[in-house]
Amino acid sequence: MADHTTAVHQRGIWANLGQFTLQTVQVFFVGLTIGMERTVLPTLSEQFGVAKGAYLFLASFVLSFGLVKGALNLVAGNLADRIGRKRVLLLGWLAGLPIPLLIYFAPNWWWIIAANVFLGVNQAFAWTMTVTMHVDLAGSHQRGLAVGIDEAAGYAAVGLAGLGTGYLASLYDPRWALLVFGLTVIGAALALMIWVRDTLPWVHAEHAQMKADGTHTGDDEAHWVSIFLLVSFRHATYRALCQGGVVNKIADTLVWALFPVYFRANHLSLVQIGWVTGVYAMVWGLSQLWTGHLADLIGRKPPIVAGFSLLALGIALTAAAGAIVWWSFAAAIMGLGMALLYPNLIAAMADLAPPLWRGRALGTYRYWRDTGYAIGALVLGAVAQWAHGATPAIWATAVLVALSGLWIALAVEESRPQARLRPMASSSDVSNASRSG
């Protein structure tokens, strides 16, 4: 029976090309959904009642997003292992429907904050599922490539949406542009759900194969609290990867909430801002087509550390530069840095987690990573408000990113299966963590 299950649900991108492609289209729509906000909303915040210089209140829409997305990543990972990936993905898209409506009818900034609560649900459920399903289908030998493709499609879409909505908002009413754009994207994603298959059978096939090969597979009954403690605090490599996730989202908060305001204060138009932030997201996205696979070949740690270094450099150059050419160049450096670190943090976590609780382990990592949005909104908003400008917040982010990369360089052990220096975290580690906690 195990042999039959394994044969029917073979792992590998080419063996599952149809479903893998469908998930890539899904994550492209996920990226379009979050990307539609990135150029238009921060620059129009005064129209929603945000006073000039009220950076903390401005950043609150990212705060609400980060708190909800971070918390629900835990829920999504647990649900995915229990009820299946497809159902969670569907819930994510249903949660997305109110977003463009709330933006269109918003009388004040509090409605934008509420819209981003729904955006947090949408992204936590939908993007968590696309990356999990990509990993399920690809198998361990193509895990970095699979995550790279997922993130490439998603963040290329973020960049395209930011640029596209910038153009639309300059030609038409900004709210109307976001309404039509958002409903079209979410409606198309829901329509495609008809052809999506759940990938839990591939997980069970992987588990059966590992069991037949005598490989330790982890404990399916391990409690999510024990897994959370292990991934968050008890395991040195997991812990270092989680803090890296937090800090890279602090950097992305800077781009989302403060870069548009910073560039607007330096007299860039909506379209020019769309180009600069679009370069960042598209370089980030498209470069992941090779950075994830690179880590399959040479290991996860070198690209991750290099990525943090480039990200810190690009942020510092943004603060030091004073022209759109240099800001675009800095955005490309930041995008390349993100491309090197972002998919490989996820791939490293997936390497370490046994298949039967991979969803819960990735959910824990994504909880910490996306809570970075909330932390970034609070910290960077407070710094910018205290300093009466965005530039000090940009410099502070560059320092945080550099320190995070140093932590990973010193604390992380290589997790790529062929190069791993010690066995993956197992159910006994979970049990020990639970007892010691």
Image (cartoon, grey):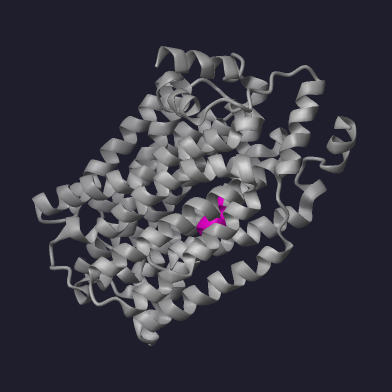
Q: Is 368 or 407 nearer to us in this picture?
A: 368
Q: Residue at x 55, y 50 (%)?
A: 151
Instruction: Judge whether 415 appears above or below 174 on screen.
Output: above
Q: Quadrant of residue 98?
A: bottom left
Q: Position of residue 198 (x, y in %)?
A: 70, 50
The residue lying toward the viewer, choosing from 338 and 333, is 338
Please tell me which residue is depicted at 44% across the width and 60% down the height of the picture: 279
Image height of 15 relative to 236, above or below = below
Residue 87 position, x and y percent, is: 62, 54
> What is the x, y in percent for residue 18?
77, 57
Q: Residue at x 54, y 76 (%)?
A: 184
- In the image: residue 318, left or right of residue 181: left
Which residue sits at x=81%, y=20%? 213
Q: Quadrant of the C terminus?
A: top left
Q: Is residue 260 magenta?
A: no
Q: Position of residue 154 (x, y in %)?
A: 54, 57
Residue 101 visible in this rendered orientation of the protein? yes
The range drawn in magenta is 151-156
Quarter of the image for the N terminus: give it: top right
Give the answer, above or below, for where 248 lies relative to 53. above
Specify the principal SS of the magenta part. helix
Residue 426 visible from this viewpoint: no
Farthest bottom residue in view: 172
- Number of numbered tags placed on the structure image: 0
